[in-house]
Image (tube, coloured by chain):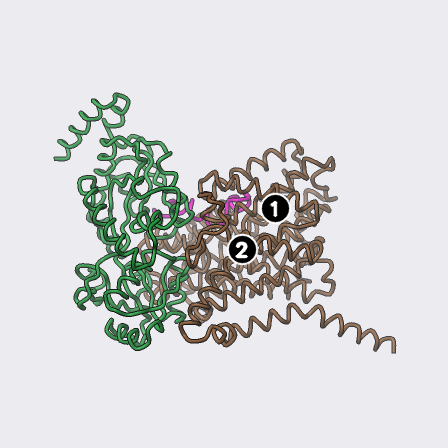
Amino acid sequence: MPGFEYLLHALSPMSLLIAFAGVLAGILIGAMPGLTATMAVAVLVPFTFGMEPGVALIALGAIYTGAIYGGAYSAILLKTPGTPSSIATTFDGYPMAKRGDGDLALTLACLASVFGGLVGAAFLLLLAPPLASVALSFGPVEYFWLAIFGLTLIASLSEGSLIKSLIGGCIGLLLSMIGVAEVGGDVRFTGDSQALLGGIDIVSALIGLYCVPVLLELVASPDPHMRLGSRVSSYRLGEGMRQCWKSRFNIIRSSVIGTVVGILPGAGGSIASLIAYSEARRVAKQPEKFGTGEPDGLLATESSNNATVGGGFIPTLVLGIPGTPPDAVILGALLVQGVRVGPQLFGEQSEIVYTFIYGLFIATVLMLPVGLLVGRYAFKSLVGIPKALLAPSVAFLTILGSYAVHNNAHEVLQMVLLGGFAWVMASWGFSASPIVLGLILGSIAEGGFVQGYLIGSAKGSALAEFFGRPISIGIIVFILVGLLYPVLTRRFGKKEMKHEYA
Amino acid sequence: MRKLQSAIARMTVASLCSISLGAAAAYPEQTINYIIPFGPGGESDIAARLQEPLFKKLGGQPVAIQYKAGAGGAAAWAQLNSMTADGYTMMGTNLPHIVLQPMEKDVGYRTADMTNVYWFHYTPDALLVTADSPYKTLADYLAAARKAPGGVIVGGTGTNSGNELAKARLDKLAGIKTTYIPFKGTGAVNTALLGKQVAASWGYTTVKLQLGDQVRCLAVAMEARHPRMPDCPTFRELGIDMVGGVYRGLAVPSNTPAAVQKQVAGLIGQINKDPAFVEKMLDNGFTVVDVGPEQMKDFMDKMNKEYAEAAKDLGIKAK
């Protein structure tokens, strides 16, 4: 194993303490709706300036990985993704919590996150330089097709009717166009309001679209907000482990998907977990159970989003290109520290790199005990808290979280308006996820399309640019398979049935 | 000299209004809010992080760095004048952004609304290619662009941004035509450059130093070569009169008393003189400049004129 001697450095009491504190802080921040992993890292960066570079990196990596995992708490217990990475965790996590399996869901999320994080870190340790080239093979056209692929996955989200999901996706796409166009600078759909120039912020949209309807529901219905499991005080660790073993292929596949998507700058945990989720659903024996509290769905999203942490560090450290938004903050912190990232980092400053990578392993492992403990505490207090106290506390958090996005009241207003909108839409059977996916993927698709079109035109043919590049063709095939798979299996399945009858 | 200045400042403030007397007596007396109009991790943030320890060391008070990103900085700049004007709220300000943005459309502030107290560094424009690019020199690049007008594809961040301005200026000065592809942020441009989606990219000296040996700098828009990039010639050396880049500084709410503005500027000027700070800024590709309140009007007049001219090249129709 490369740089093994630095494992001992990473195991020093100081490093361990820092990793522990970082993971804990990350989990707590990530669990708050609105406080994202990017924010967690940005807020805590100044504390690392006094540390030596290797230890500072461990602290930042620990905060980051903790925050990505922490997002699962609110996704499971409140149906509100704590960070964009845990959007897909709400699909099965919340139904599990509703039926009294919240404790099991939290344990599964913890186990999956730790495993995914370890897989991502292992790729970072062993294959970083060759894998970094993956980041460079994706051009604007490939991002366009990737976003289109993501949009087709809306069809596979099993909440509600397909038509309503597609309409929701279109609403999301329209919302993504509000503001100054990324490419071209046109001002669109702002209604002359300066507050909308920056567009709809994804985090405030997340809080509004997911959390506000849940909040209103909480107040409007007389039922208890969460059913108690029969064994509240236990972790249900054994049960969770058995479930993980049963789903081992799902977890491994999801972790690899997470790592690869994490390497792509501009994709990130939300897309990774979505792809992992739909893949898990596609190969499942009973895909109809997804969305109703299927542990496999939860395991897929939580292992893949933590795998993006290690994956995202690959282009960050090897090329100096941040793989994810929190990586951009960490990159900035490294520059301030005087660390030069880039290919030479693995040669000249290998001490820092390997200390960090082993530190990331340790932080990820520490997530297991810390996560289980915090999870049990969060679960117990959320179940025990009277509704009259829970509703206003969550409402307060939504306002705090949306204000924290840009330290601006505009986002609070956006959040409330979108929340009201989502509540009305929910009463007609529209769910929030397609809208959010349209919002996130719309801007990626648009940027990729316009850039690809400009590049293609300058080269002579835009069509050749979009349909002639090998990776593009690969993604297009995936899109077609994804769209036609249900049709084909239905026909294939019928034939099989006939055989049985014959 | 500084003593004399602060003495004058104290007298001016005392005569203006007695409330500000306390603030003038010793500045700073409390934590300063330092608002970055962008997200974390960019050039503005890195520079602020390098200044941070010196605020404490030289001013005796810490700064609280906050981010208010949105609309390319406009979201924050539109709010600046409604913030507390006591010298404890200051905001990063950028050229050409604050000139070009309001020229194009209503962004909630006008260039004249900005009370810039100090420009403290600039990042010169640099034309970058990958290390294995067929363009070994600027001459190669220009020749290729002449051979196939519009066929050379260059990347940069944003539309009507500093990068696109640099592209438009070189195109005009050298009489060439290139295709500009705007990307979302430096990370995305760098990915496109290293992945050879674009043949070259417009960046700054900071970008070259960040990417290291993976990229070659064809030319830099400085008056003399950057000390940390001795191999990169200036445009002027190559016969093209192009000097420019993004200036970064600090602005305060417009109601901030002139004397307090002077004190803010004084502290920034002091930080800019710290030798270790200047070294670190250079290492990261920043070039420290000093445009304080005395030179501010002349400097802004000059820049406004320059950018108005350049805006024509970009095709921005002034409102």
Q: Nearer the viewer, residue A263 or A233?
A: A263
Q: Which residue: 59% across, 59% down?
A: A274
Q: Amino acid at mark 2?
A: Ile
Rendered hue of chain B is green
Chain bearing mark 1? A
Residue A278 is inside the magenta segment: no
Which chain is brown in the rendering? A
Give the percent coordinates (x, y) of residue B72: 39, 50
Occupied quadrant, residue B123:
bottom left
Q: Which residue: 52% across, 72% down?
A: A472
Q: Badge 1 is on which residue? A: A210
Give the percent coordinates (x, y) of residue A320: 38, 62
Q: Which residues are drawn in magenta?
A: A28-51
Q: Is residue B58 visible?
A: yes
Q: Are marks 2 and 1 in contact (CB under 8 Å)?
A: no
Give the percent coordinates (x, y) of residue A216: 65, 38
Q: Badge 2 is on which residue? A: A440
Give the percent coordinates (x, y) of residue A247: 67, 62
Classify A275 as above or below A409: below
Residue A50 is inside the magenta segment: yes
Q: Nearer the viewer, residue A313 or B260?
A: B260
Q: CA distance from mark 2 to mark 1?
A: 15 Å
